[in-house]
Image (tube, grey):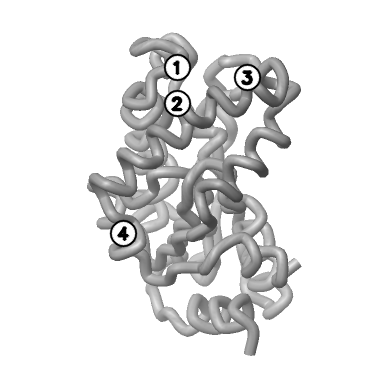
Amino acid sequence: MSVGDDMVRDVLARNSAHPLRVAIDGVTASGKSTCARWLVNAIAAKGRPAVHVTMDGFHHRRAHRYRQGRASALGYYRDAYDFDALREHVLIPLGPNGSGAIRRRVIDLASDEPVDDPLEAVPADAVVVVDGTFLHRPPLPDYWDYTVFVDTPMDVARARGTARDADALGGEVAAGMAFDQRYHAACRIYLDEVDPRERATRVLPGIDSLLSME
């Protein structure tokens, strides 16, 4: 059985009276979104409803994200994501005695404008997969039913991220500096402070495991 098949079987074996809330965590550019999309498709192929939510829709607005400076690692760690909104609009509604209706985003990241999408009803037997960075930061673990940490080596994630974000960040050199000074520097704070590998239900061993699932 492959790593991916074993993970799917493990997720589907979890019994819950409400939608199963699954976190896909990892450092920036570790392959979290790849893993989340694969898992959603694999679960749906088994006949179970599956929903994908990305933390891209739960950023703070730019003025808040960059209030400690555009290069600040601590600013990225503390200020980038609106975890309170994630709890309010996704995790609590999907939990015990929740409404079962969620919003998949509170902001349009490209325009930096808040959005107020209609509520979306989620079946009680659904698996809702959320991908993002810092998803084991307290108090979030209290709301997850299953968590995955995508343990891609930092140098591999950096190479993937700089290639992916070069156009958006002003070229490959500038992208590399952004990863070194802000994104991965923040991830190192997170790894030291929270130790998500120890908190995760499952540690997925690196990018090779992700690529083998595609």
Disc 1/disc 3 C-alpha distance (Å): 11 Å
Give the residue displayed 36% in from the left and 37% down from the top: 83
Q: Amino acid at mark 2?
A: Arg
Viewer-nearest residue: 23 or 27: 27
Residue at numbered disc 2? 182
Q: Secondary structure at mark 3?
A: helix
Viewer-nearest residue: 201 or 107: 201
Q: Tell us which disc is closer to us: 1 or 3.
A: 3
Give the residue displayed 40% in from the left and 33% down from the top: 185
Ranked by sequence position, the earlier of labels 1 and 4 is: 1
Q: Is residue 18 above or below residue 108?
A: below
Ranked by sequence position, the earlier of labels 2 and 1 is: 1
Q: Amino acid at mark 1?
A: Ala
Disc 1/disc 4 C-alpha distance (Å): 41 Å
Residue 174 got which mark? 3
Residue 21: where, in percent of width, then height? 44, 61
Residue 65: where, in percent of width, then height? 42, 18
Residue at numbered disc 4? 97
Viewer-nearest residue: 53 or 169: 169
Disc 3/disc 2 C-alpha distance (Å): 12 Å
Residue 164: where, in percent of width, then height? 71, 36
Q: Left of 96 or right of it: where is 82?
A: right
Residue 8 got which mark? none
Answer with the quarter of the image where residue 145 lies.
Answer: bottom left
Ranked by sequence position, the earlier of labels 1 and 3 is: 1
Residue 71 got which mark? 1
Disc 4/disc 3 C-alpha distance (Å): 47 Å
Kindly give the residue lying farthest to the bottom in the view shown: 1
Q: Amino acid at mark 3?
A: Ala
Ranked by sequence position, the earlier of labels 4 and 3 is: 4
